[in-house]
Image (spheres, rainbow, N blue to C red):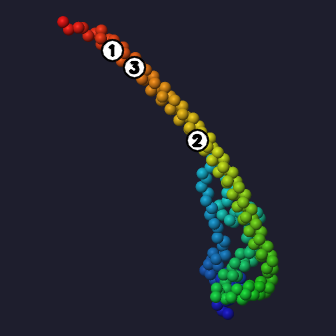
Amino acid sequence: MAKLMSVLEKYSIIEKNMPEEDTLVAEADRKTVTMPLDTKNTSTVEDKNDITNIEELYEKHNMQIQSSQQTVFYLENLIKALPTELPEFVKQTTINNILQVSAINLDTLLTDGHKRNSVLNTYIKQYEHTMNLEISKLYHEITKYNEMIAKCQETIQQKQDTLKGQLDLMSSESKRINNILEFCNNKPKE
């Protein structure tokens, strides 16, 4: 029982008077993990809907974590606090008992989880749609530039052909004139 109590205390499921050093450890355990997202912007358009961590998204939708006992993450703490070798039904019964004793409504926590999941799904669908539109625009620009490049290459080829034709024409005329001049400059030998 003492082991279970220490685990419950560790995950802030029940409170105990802790020395100052233990308080810092408990506070570090309660902090939520933030997941950094890739913020490198390869587009020339600034992505205004980018978030740098999940908490930012929750704050945007007024879902900050006020008390860990009012969110679905409280259930996560309870689940982690129980020994892994316990059967599922024992874990569920234990969690239900802890919630009843703590006067915490399971449905409220589950509703919070569904809302958070909905916010995440809505965000990623909108973000994916926006990014796919931007990617499509960039591909369209690439196609447009490729067409411009092809036209420029065609023009370059035409100009090179014209230049070669002019060089050949001038060289031919120059040879003709040189032959005439050479003929006239050469005096017959006597």
Which quadrant holds the N terminus? bottom right
- For disc 1, the marked residue is 179
Mark 2 or 3: the one toward you: 3
Labels 1 and 3: the sequence-earlier one? 3
Q: Position of residue 139 (x, y in %)?
A: 63, 47
Residue at 63% in and 66% down: 35
Query: From the viewer's perspective, is 64 left or right of 140?
Result: right
Residue located beneath label 2 in the image: 146
**Residue beneath label 3, please?**
172
Spatial CA span between label 2 and label 3: 38 Å
- Earlier in the chain: of badge 2 and badge 3, it is 2
Which of the 4 image quarters holds residue 2? bottom right
Q: Which percent across, then down, holds residue 170?
A: 42, 19
State the residue at coordinates (66%, 81%).
80
Residue 57 - label:
none
At x 24%, y 8%, the residue is 187
Find the residue positioned furthest to the top.
190
| Above or below for 154 versus 77 | above
Q: Distance between the residues labelled 1 and 3?
A: 11 Å
User: In this rendering, is residue 20 above or below 161?
Assistant: below
Quadrant of the image containing the C terminus: top left
The answer to whether residue 108 is visible is: yes
Quarter-of-image position of residue 189: top left
* Between 79 and 29, the one nearer to me in the picture: 79
* Quarter holding residue 113: bottom right
